[in-house]
């Protein structure tokens, strides 16, 4: 049948409709048979479907790529594919594809060393999701202005609506092109509207089912601690953010001669969340706690996360402990892993831990707690922890771990839920201490599981795609105006050296952006592929079982292995593979929700500053304009190319904006910009060069 279809379409420049093709086929196929054949021809690259729904034969067989669309408010989009370079899709070639849709794309331009450009030829699968927008009334009819620009400007609503006025934020589904209202969220001036929008958009579960809460309520600390090592006389304490309510990791540090003994003690959530219980099923479904600035949607009920599993000072708590003997050059020479019971002697904030290390008094508004008489012993341990962290950081440098340190915003809200101020989230030395200790514990558990051939969930980070690396190297040379002498060999060492060679902070920021975009996403897998970024042969997540389900599964399997209760490894591997896959997807949802609420808050704040000028850095150049990161607000805005004048063009390498053939703006340049318009809900920040006015560029 496919050959007959190709013959029928021969010479039909405008294509033929489905019904016409069916009429001309003999014997005449069913609709399902014809649809299948047409889809196969599209996938194979022989035909395409036009905007009008007609089918047209291609002159040359197309090279088709399959992936997901990420669409931007400026109208264009990108095809995203694992392990491959993104493909730029101009707005006119998106063919109605929305963010998250799975599509087939034909390459319109593919030249060596140049950015690939394509056209959507088929939408294979629409992403099923909840959308959000604003409900308005026009001439006695109701419409929605969707937040997602790929849905169009106005969507008619056929449902009966019992509202007297416009301006309500709503959530809705799309069934085909029909809008189905889901929920009225509130108005723009509602302090909770950003939070409510994100919760609806990503369908985050705010409440726990009653059976789960009852399950949690029935749990208590055990009367006896059989099968556990008693560490209650050790100097063990926690270090966390000021605002933390759950404490799932604690540390202890001792030293004898040249050997440090590091203890990492992690809340034993698996003791309470038993396999296939209501709690376990709910935790697996959620997979992660989601942190939305001043609110948390937890993976576990408060009875567990803030009480039974939280390593509070002055209380007995069940833990899984990893005890490591570490030499002065950072090598772990012995380790032991076992269930334990601890009694934390202190709860420290990062700020107070930093001050104690530097022999300064605690903060005036200190939230730190010390059980009676333990301050000096905690201080002594902290000093040792600082020494050991320096050793581990040097070891990290030796193995060329890549630390892409892009500044992130710390948003402080007022009581009304609006931005009070935005600060750089500075990484204190005390945070680095905990980070290094947790990494060391994760590596040690991963090593144990690997060498004992115990099935587990690894946290993997694969080597970057070669094409993306090549583009990064080329951009790096142009931005830094230096030549990369070595491009082969130990890639970690090469990238580490390139990052550290850049001294100017703003240039380093752009280089870090470019390198981050060339990297693969870290993910969960039962197959150990190592962690490229950390330069480690094996790595997993063990240290946060209160807020990450993969960590909880690692604990559970580890305890089975320690008790020699692992029997059916094949079935276990299948279960772990499923958890790894679903957790990776859930993690992406959690990250997007956290990014969205941050963007909504910042854009809402900037809406009040339209017309004002700010400093920024050019972080991306595309054929249609320039993305600028506003230095004080940690958010990107877009300047259309025409705003630089009629003679403005972009060079083929997407590194410079040229005017009359001369480079005037480059990646990494500082630039003063004017905020023209902020569309908070579409996450659109329209910028122009400082001093811009419409008359001067027309």
Image (cartoon, rainbow, N blue to C red):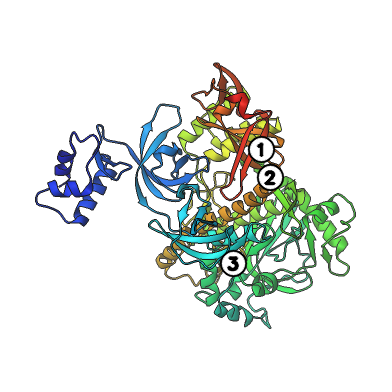
**Quarter of the rendering occupied by the C terminus:** top right
Q: Is tag 2's residue or tag 1's residue first in the polypeptide sequence?
A: 2
Horizontal and vertical percent position of residue 241: 74, 58
Please say whether residue 375 is visible from this viewpoint: yes
Separation (CA) of disc 3 from disc 2? 33 Å
Is residue 497 positioned above or below 239 on the image?
above
Tell me the SS state at disc 2: helix
Q: In which quarter of the image is residue 677?
A: top right
Give coordinates of residue 679: x percent, y percent: 60, 46
On residue 547, which mark appears? none
Of pointers 3 and 1, the one earlier in the residue sequence: 3
Mark 2 surroundings: few (<14), some (14-19) or many (≥20) residues within 10 A: some
Front in this rendered view, residue 48 or 491: 48
Q: Position of residue 71 (x, y in %)?
A: 48, 44
Mark 3, secondary structure of its residue: loop
Q: Which residue is drawn at 19% across and 54% down?
A: 33
Residue at 20% over, 55% down: 31
Q: Can residue 500 be seen in this view?
A: no
Question: Which residue occupies the foreground of this view, 433 or 633?
Answer: 633
Location of mark 2 (residue) = 606
Q: Earlier in the sequence, mark 3 or mark 2?
A: 3
In the image, 119: left or right of 489? left
Asked whether disc 2 touches disc 1, contact meaning CB atoms under 8 Å apart, the reply is yes
| Mark 3, residue position | 299
Residue highlighted by disc 1: 675
Q: Is residue 144 left or right of residue 445?
A: left
| Percent of width and height locating residue 271 | 60, 74
Work out which residue is located at the far left of the displayed protein and give it. Answer: 27
């Amino acid at each position: 049948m496919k050959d007959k279809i190709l013959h029928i379409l021969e010479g039909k420049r405008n294509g033929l409709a489905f019904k016409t093709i069916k009429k001309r086929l003999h014997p005449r196929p069913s609709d399902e048979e014809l649809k299948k054949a047409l889809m196969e021809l599209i996938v194979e690259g022989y035909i395409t479907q036009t905007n009008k729904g007609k089918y047209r034969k291609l002159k040359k067989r197309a090279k088709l790529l399959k992936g997901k669309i990420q669409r931007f408010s400026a109208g264009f989009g990108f095809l995203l594919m694992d392990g491959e370079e993104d493909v730029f899709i101009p707005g006119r070639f998106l063919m109605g594809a929305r963010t998250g849709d799975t599509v087939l794309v034909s390459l319109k331009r593919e030249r060596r060393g140049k950015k690939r450009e394509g056209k959507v030829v088929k939408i294979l699968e629409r992403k099923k999701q909840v959308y959000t927008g604003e409900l308005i009334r026009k001439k006695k009819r109701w419409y929605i202005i969707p937040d997602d620009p790929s849905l169009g400007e106005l969507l008619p609503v056929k449902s009966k609506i019992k509202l007297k006025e416009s301006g309500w934020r709503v959530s809705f589904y799309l069934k085909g092109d029909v809008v189905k209202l889901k929920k009225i969220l509130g108005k723009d001036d509602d302090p909770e509207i950003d939070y409510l929008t994100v919760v609806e958009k990503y369908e985050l579960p705010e409440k726990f089912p009653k059976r789960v809460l009852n399950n949690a309520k029935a749990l208590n600390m055990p009367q006896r601690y059989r099968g556990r090592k008693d560490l209650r006389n050790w100097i063990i304490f926690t270090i966390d953010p000021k605002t933390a309510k759950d404490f799932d990791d604690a540390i202890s540090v001792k030293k004898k001669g040249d050997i440090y003994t590091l203890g990492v003690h992690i809340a034993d959530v698996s003791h309470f969340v038993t396999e296939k219980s209501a709690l376990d099923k709910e935790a697996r479904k959620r997979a992660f706690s989601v942190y939305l600035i001043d609110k948390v949607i937890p993976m576990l009920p408060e009875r567990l996360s803030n009480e039974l599993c939280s390593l509070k000072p002055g209380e007995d708590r069940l833990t899984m402990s990893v005890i490591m003997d570490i030499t002065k050059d950072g090598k772990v020479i012995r380790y032991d892993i076992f269930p334990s019971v601890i009694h934390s002697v202190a709860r420290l904030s990062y700020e107070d831990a930093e001050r104690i290390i530097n022999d300064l008094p605690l903060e005036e508004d200190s939230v730190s707690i010390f059980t009676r008489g333990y301050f000096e012993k905690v201080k002594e341990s902290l000093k040792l922890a600082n020494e050991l962290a320096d050793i581990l950081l040097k070891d990290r440098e030796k193995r060329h771990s890549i630390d892409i340190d892009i500044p992130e915003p710390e948003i402080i809200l007022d009581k009304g839920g609006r931005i009070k101020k935005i600060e750089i989230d500075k990484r204190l030395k005390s945070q680095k201490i905990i980070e290094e200790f947790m990494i060391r514990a994760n590596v040690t558990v991963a090593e144990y599981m690997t060498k004992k051939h115990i099935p587990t969930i690894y946290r993997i980070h694969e080597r970057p795609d070669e094409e993306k690396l090549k583009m990064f190297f080329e951009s790096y040379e142009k931005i830094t105006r230096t030549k990369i002498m070595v491009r082969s060999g130990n890639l970690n060492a090469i990238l580490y050296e390139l990052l550290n060679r850049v001294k100017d902070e703003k240039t380093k920021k752009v280089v870090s952006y470019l390198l981050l975009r060339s990297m693969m996403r870290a993910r969960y897998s039962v197959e150990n592929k190592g962690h490229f970024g950390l330069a480690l042969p094996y790595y997993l997540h063990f240290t946060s079982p209160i807020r990450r389900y993969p960590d909880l599964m690692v604990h559970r399997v580890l305890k089975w292995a320690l008790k020699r209760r692992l029997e059916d490894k094949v079935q276990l591997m299948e279960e772990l593979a499923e958890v790894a896959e679903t957790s990776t997807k859930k993690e992406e949802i959690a990250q997007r929700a956290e990014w969205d609420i941050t963007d909504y808050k910042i854009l809402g704040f900037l809406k009040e500053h339209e017309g004002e000028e700010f400093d920024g850095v050019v972080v991306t150049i595309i054929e249609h304009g320039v993305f600028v990161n506003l230095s004080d607000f940690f958010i990107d805005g877009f300047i259309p190319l025409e705003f630089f004048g009629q003679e403005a063009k972009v060079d083929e390498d997407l590194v410079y904006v040229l005017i009359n053939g001369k480079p005037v703006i480059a990646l990494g340049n500082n630039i003063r910009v004017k905020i023209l318009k902020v569309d908070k809900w579409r996450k659109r920040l329209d910028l122009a060069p400082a001093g811009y006015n419409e008359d001067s560029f027309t």
